[in-house]
Image (cartoon, rainbow, N blue to C red):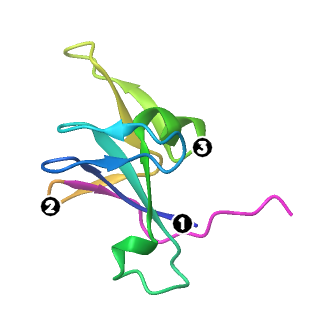
Amino acid sequence: MDLRACGIISMGHICCDHCSREIKYGEKYAYVSDWSKDTDRSDKASRYCAECSVALGYMHWVRDTKTGRVFARLKGGEIVNGYENVKQQARQSSN
């Protein structure tokens, strides 16, 4: 699977596909999809809470030098139209 983007829950709720914890309003999560398949179908994507995203290697912790606040940011991410995105890249398998 390849990293697609991350988002912040604005309405409703979803559960982390790794730990099954509910990701609540205002929380950041990683949206992971397989680029080799139809990516228009969001039901094929996986969503991970920030803690699991860090543990799985999709995100890393960053400290804001002005406020001291710590938050999760996508590895290799960039901000595009208010959303963090990672350019299409294949994750290397351990085989």
Residue farthest to the top, as pictured? 68
Q: What residue is rendered at 60% in x and 43% in y?
A: 56
Q: Quadrant of the C terminus?
A: bottom right
Q: Main secondary structure of the magenta part?
A: loop
Q: Position of residue 61 (x, y in %)?
A: 44, 28
Q: Are marks 3 and 1 in contact (CB under 8 Å)?
A: no
Residue at the extreme right of the image, as rendered: 95
Front label number (1 vs 2): 1
Tell me the CA gap for discs 3 and 1.
Answer: 12 Å
Q: Between residues 70 and 44, which one lies in front from this camera angle?
A: 44
Please indicate whether residue 48 sits to the left or right of residue 84 in the image.
right
Residue named by callout 2: 81
Residue 72: percent from left, percent from top: 38, 34
Residue located at (18% from left, 37% from top): 26
The kind of secondary structure element at disc 3 is loop
Cα distance between the residues tagged 1 and 2: 20 Å
Residue position for label 3: 56
Counting residues from the start of the chain, the first of labels 3 and 1 encountered is: 1
Q: Is residue 18 above or below residue 45?
A: above
For this view, does 40 lie left or right of residue 36? left
**Number of residues whose C-alpha sits closer than 10 Å to that of mark 2, classed few (under 14), some (14–19) or many (20 or more):** few
Considering the image in quadrants, where does the N terminus appear? bottom right
Residue ID for mark 1: 2
Q: Is residue 81 above or below residue 33?
A: above
Label 3 neighbour load within 10 Å: few <14, some 14-19, many 20+:
few
